[in-house]
């Protein structure tokens, strides 16, 4: 990092960092093939730097058949030609570092692609072979082994098992895949699997990445008996006790580097105490608080989530990690514009009415609320533009296996992955060269939401984020404030008011009426105009005592 960065800040940067998530397929297309790439991303680093974030998390850029947008990794040490080369990735890491931006990469340890050499070798080898032992191969049940070995469901719908044809042409064993069939699960009881991922971590740390986002981080280890669900005792593959050993070994690797390399877990656990166990000082550094993203726009629910998260994290001295949105979930302005503003994978449906103005107003208020909380925050590309979920993509353009494997019942995740609008008045909005056709079509109405359009509009979502990040950095950003907690202030029902870290006081009104603000204060920033010392509905204000 720049030598101007104080040593104490360098050591603890991750405790209160704002990290910007980039889904490279949809960020910027440098070569005009309709798919975002590293050349395009490098040209857009100005935008990231101007936003004022500390780091970027880049979702998988590895060689992949793209059955699940790159989460089907065929080579965890490479870069897919669609995105560029390993040299491009190294250049990007150095260039970002010169601008004071750290890079986190995504490591996908639960599964590989069916095109990975290990899986190819497993298919070519007989049952019981060492090649198959790196995965979960089992004979089927029932006459002729026609039924899957157990009743586990795939996260994407259908059974979590697929039967293979043996090299001699006969129907053979089944293999486990908690996601798509193109994503066979690895067997974490096999020492070769553990050694491989430890080596992958070192590979990227040696190239200067500052951290790893661990994909599907609660699912790696399995009960070797692979029992049916529901069973008695611990879950056969979620949050198992032996998983902690994996992360202890990873933490030792991260800690062997002179500057901190951080591990952030993607952990969909509902119990904050179970989550916090992964954040003990010798395990992962942080994990996303998905309960915050699942909570509806409701003061009591959000406050309960904040309190439980802070308590769970305080017990292990880990900073909470807040997130409102990512490449898997409904975009924030759309979610908050619905009558039911909670998020649940199981509850995703088509044709749910949305009030976009209300959703945007709440998303602005939620952004300031989130950025005032102690801990780190992840933003997803386009969140800073207030992009909505695109819910009317043509059926023949959809790609997400979550949609197809649900038989179309689930709208899928393509709608939050539509390419970024940068400039101009018509698609591709500067995403790629004029005349290129982005892999998912952008709505013409996004002309009003481009980076260029928002840059010059003082009240735009983009300028709200820029101001908020500048003020947050000024108000916190130091070892004395990063660990301080949160103190709730007396406030009317439906209003969240607290002193956050540093000098910020945050007031969020989640009711539908005006509420009075305290006397004798300066307003540093508000998500909507304030009138006469009151806070309008669905508005957040950042205050400082006058
Ligand atoms: O699908 C879920 C619940 O039904 C989620 O909990 C799911 O496990 C979670 O979203 C995992 O996501 C990650 O791994 C997937 C990939 O498709 C996602 O994009 C990624 O974020 C498989 O690698």
Image: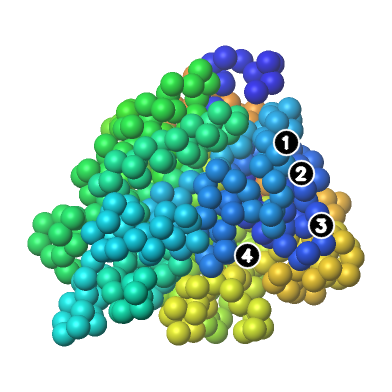
The quadrant the N terminus occupies is top right
Circle 4 crowding by C-alpha within 10 Å: few under 14, some 14–19, many from 20 = many
Q: Which of marks 4 and 3 is nearer the N terminus?
A: 3
Between 122 and 31, which is closer to the camera in this rendering? Answer: 122
| Mark-to-mark CA distance, 4 and 2 | 19 Å
Q: What is the C-alpha distance between the residues marked 2 and 1?
A: 9 Å
The residue wearing badge 3 is 31
- 289 above or below 387? above
Q: Residue 349 carries which label?
A: none
Q: Which residue is located at x 67 percent, y 63 percent?
A: 387
Position above or below: 277 against 508: above
Nearer mark to the viewer, of 2 and 3: 3
Inspect this view and state whether residue 232 appears: yes
- Counting residues from the start of the chain, the first of labels 4 and 2 encountered is 2
Q: Which label sits on residue 417? A: 4
- Neighbour tally class for label 3: few under 14, some 14-19, many 20 plus, Cα within 10 Å: some
| 511 with respect to 314 (left or right) | right
Q: Name the outermost residue toward the front.
A: 168
Q: Mark 2 points at which residue?
A: 42
The nearer-to-camera label among 1 and 4 is 1
- Disc 1 versus disc 3: distance between alpha carbons? 17 Å
Q: Which of marks 2 and 1 is in front?
A: 1
Residue 507 visible in image = no
Position of residue 215 measured from the top left corner of the image (x, y, whole percent): 44, 51
The picture places residue 289, in percent across and down from the top left corner, at 41, 49
Q: Do the residues labelled 4 and 2 touch (CB within 8 Å)?
A: no
Residue at 68% across, 36% down: 90
The residue positioned 65% from the left and 28% from the top of the image is: 474
Sequence order check: which comes first, mark 2 or mark 3?
3
Indicate whether 13 appears above or below 518.
above
């Amino acid at each position: 990092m720049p030598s101007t960065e104080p040593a104490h800040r360098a050591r603890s940067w991750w405790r209160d960092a704002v990290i910007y998530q980039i889904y490279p397929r949809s960020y910027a297309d440098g070569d005009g093939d309709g798919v975002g790439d590293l050349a395009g991303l490098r040209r857009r680093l100005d935008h990231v730097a101007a936003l004022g974030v500390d780091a970027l998390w880049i979702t998988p850029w590895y060689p992949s058949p793209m059955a699940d947008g790159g989460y089907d990794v065929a080579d965890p040490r490479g870069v897919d030609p669609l995105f560029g080369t390993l040299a491009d990735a190294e250049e990007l890491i150095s260039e970002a570092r010169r601008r004071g931006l750290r890079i986190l990469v995504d490591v996908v340890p639960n599964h590989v692609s069916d095109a990975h050499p290990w899986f190819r070798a497993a298919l070519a080898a007989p049952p019981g072979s060492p090649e198959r032992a790196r995965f979960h191969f089992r004979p089927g049940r029932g006459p002729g082994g026609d039924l899957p070995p157990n009743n586990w469901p795939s996260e994407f719908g259908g059974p979590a098992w697929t039967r293979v044809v043996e090299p001699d042409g006969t129907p053979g064993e089944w293999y486990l895949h908690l996601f798509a069939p193109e994503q066979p699960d690895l067997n974490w009881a096999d020492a070769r699997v553990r050694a491989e991922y430890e080596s992958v971590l070192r590979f990227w740390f040696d190239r200067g990445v500052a951290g790893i986002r661990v994909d599907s981080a609660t699912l790696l280890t399995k009960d070797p008996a692979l029992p049916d669900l529901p069973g008695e005792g611990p879950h056969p593959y979620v949050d198992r006790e032996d998983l902690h050993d994996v992360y202890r070994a990873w933490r030792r690797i991260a800690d062997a580097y002179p500057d901190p390399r951080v591990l952030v877990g993607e952990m969909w656990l509902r119990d904050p105490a179970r989550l916090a166990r992964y954040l003990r000082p010798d395990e992962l550094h942080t994990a996303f608080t998905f309960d915050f993203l699942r909570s509806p726009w409701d003061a009591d629910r959000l406050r309960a989530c904040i309190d439980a998260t802070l308590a769970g994290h305080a017990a292990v001295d880990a900073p909470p990690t807040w997130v409102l949105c990512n490449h898997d979930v409904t975009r924030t302005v759309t979610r908050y514009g619905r009558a039911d503003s909670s998020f649940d994978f199981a509850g995703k449906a088509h044709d749910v009415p949305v009030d976009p103005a209300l959703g945007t107003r709440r998303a602005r208020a939620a952004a300031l609320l989130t950025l005032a909380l102690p801990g780190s925050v992840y933003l997803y590309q386009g969140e800073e533009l207030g992009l909505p979920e695109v819910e009317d993509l043509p059926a023949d353009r959809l790609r997400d296996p979550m949609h197809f494997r649900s038989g179309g019942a689930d709208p899928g995740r393509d709608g939050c992955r539509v390419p970024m609008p940068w400039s101009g008045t018509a698609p591709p909005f500067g995403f790629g060269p004029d005349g290129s056709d982005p892999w998912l079509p952008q709505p013409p109405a996004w002309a009003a939401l481009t980076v260029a359009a928002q840059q010059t509009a003082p009240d735009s979502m983009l300028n709200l984020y820029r101001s908020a990040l500048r003020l947050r950095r000024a108000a916190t950003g130091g070892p004395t404030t990063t660990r301080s907690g949160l103190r709730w202030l007396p406030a009317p029902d439906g209003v969240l008011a607290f002193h956050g870290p540093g000098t910020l006081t945050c007031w969020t009104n989640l009711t539908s009426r005006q509420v009075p603000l305290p006397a004798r204060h300066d307003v540093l920033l508000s998500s909507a105009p304030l009138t006469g010392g009151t806070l309008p509905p669905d508005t957040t204000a950042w205050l400082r005592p006058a």
